[in-house]
Image: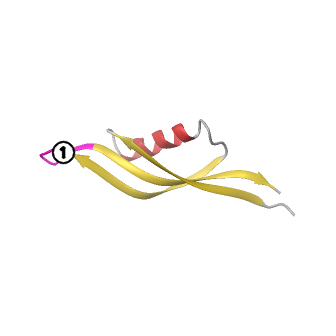
């Protein structure tokens, strides 16, 4: 019988372009040291604005799941 073991970590990422870019950038960065990434889900989305309400930065907090081994 074979069991798969996965681990979940939390990361934060930001982008001036948008949510998708923040998520993609965070996943690319974490993939430099974490292998076998299988998915992610967003916990929180935040925007930073200037004085007139224009969005200047998108921020996301997400959980990333990756496989650490099989028994």
**Residue 34 on the magenta segment:** no
Q: Is residue 53 left or right of residue 60?
A: left
Residue 30 drawn above or below residue 68: above
Quadrant the N terminus occupies: bottom right
Quarter occupied by residue 16: top left
Question: Which residue is drawn at the image coordinates 67% and 45% (left, top)?
Answer: 36
**Residue 51 on the magenta segment:** yes
Residue 45 in the image: state x and y as whole percent.
36, 55
* Magenta span: 50-56
Residue 64 in the image: state x and y as whole percent.
56, 52
Query: Which residue corresponds to mark 1?
Result: 54
Q: Is residue 42 left or right of residue 30?
A: left
Quadrant the C terminus occupies: bottom right
Question: Which residue is drawn at the image coordinates 79% and 54% (left, top)?
Answer: 70
Residue 41 in the image: state x and y as whole percent.
50, 57
Outermost residue, bottom direction?
A: 1
Q: Is residue 34 left or right of residue 18?
A: right
Residue 63 drawn above or below residue 14: below
């Amino acid at each position: 019988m074979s069991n798969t073991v996965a681990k979940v970590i939390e990361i934060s990422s930001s982008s001036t372009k948008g949510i998708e870019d923040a998520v993609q950038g965070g996943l690319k960065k974490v993939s430099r040291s974490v292998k076998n990434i299988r998915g992610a889900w967003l916990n929180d989305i935040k925007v930073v604005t200037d004085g007139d309400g224009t969005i200047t930065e998108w921020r996301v907090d997400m959980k990333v799941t990756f496989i650490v081994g099989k028994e």
